Amino acid sequence: MFPNFLPAAVEQLTEPSSIALAQRIKSQAIATPLTNQAITTTYVTQGSGGTPILLIHGFDSSVLEFRRLLPLLAEDNETWAVDLLGFGFTDRLSGIAYSPTAIKTHLYYFWKSLINQPVILVGASMGGATAIDFTLTYPEVVQKLVLIDSAGLAGGSTLSKLMFPPLDYLATQFLRNLKVRDRVSRMGYKNQSLASIDALCCGALHLEIPNWHQALIAFTKSGGYSAFRFKKIAEIVQPTLILWGDSDKILGIKDATRFKRAIPQSTLIWIQDCGHLPHLEKPQITARHILDFRNKPL
């Protein structure tokens, strides 16, 4: 059975990993300083033991992004994935300024409410920028950091230039178009067969959540994640693992070595024959590298 807060289109999922993760999605009302009303936040937790691993998804995505990686990590470790504020299936309340600052504040109170011990923080794509920002703001929360084809060294989205009426609504309607989402999905993979109907459903299911386009417009208008300065990134003191697909057509490959140079205690591992989404395209290899990194002494 799927949780009743998921859209009816969840029944269209076909792959076992997608169905299994969707069935595990939970919700929790999280109190934050952002609003007087608790924010109903969606997440998945699985496994036990070890330092908790917390997975952070990319732009306009959800916890379903980790449908292949999370179960592999959870075989040997307590593992979490959460829908960020303004994304996934987490409630989009009115009156909140959806921005990177709001996202990390909400993430902190989610962590404090449900995990409340240091974590290995894993961020993919835009989630990498979120993870960097969170680590710099709350260093006591993050024991180790993992960046998967991470954003954070380039500027904010060019969509921000279109976010004024009526173009803001038209821009989000463009992103809602399934043909557009399919093309973007295909860019993320080197192995095009992985851009399946099931993958498209996973990537579009959260579009049915109320206020999706309003929150996306607000976040994009905020400027999103601007480029971190090298000096700022160099303040990361946690051991950091950088995983990068060697055929990334979304962000390219230059930022991988730039992150390696900027972060003092960092290791770069290339994921061979892989695009922008190693956690979906090469989940076994990605999980092995994360678990090996977990086991390395501080």
Image (cartoon, rainbow, N blue to C red):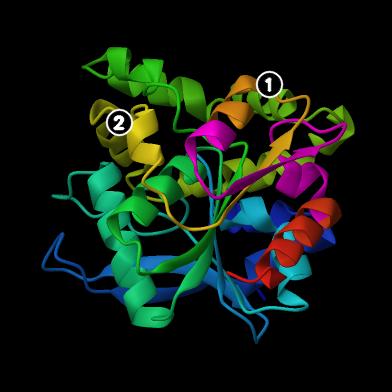
The percent position of residue 33, horizontal first and vertical second, equals: 14, 65
In the displayed structure, 170 sits above or below 231; it is above
Q: CA distance from mark 2 to mark 1?
A: 21 Å
The residue that disc 2 covers is 217
- Regarding mark 2 in the picture, which secondary structure is present there? helix
Looking at the image, residue 20 sits to the left or right of residue 58; the answer is right
Say which amino acid is labelled 1. Arg
Foreground pick, 225 / 142: 142
The percent position of residue 34, horizontal first and vertical second, equals: 16, 59
Q: Does the magenta-highlighted stretch encompass residue 16? A: no
Which residue is located at x 79 percent, y 34 percent?
Answer: 195
- Residue 3 is at least partly visible in this image: no
Q: Provide the residue span drawn in magenta.
A: 259-283
Which residue is located at x 73 percent, y 66 percent?
Answer: 291
- Regarding mark 1 in the picture, which secondary structure is present there? helix
Foreground pick, 195 / 285: 285
Rendered image: mark on residue 236: none
Foreground pick, 190 / 237: 237
The residue that disc 1 covers is 183
Foreground pick, 128 / 164: 128
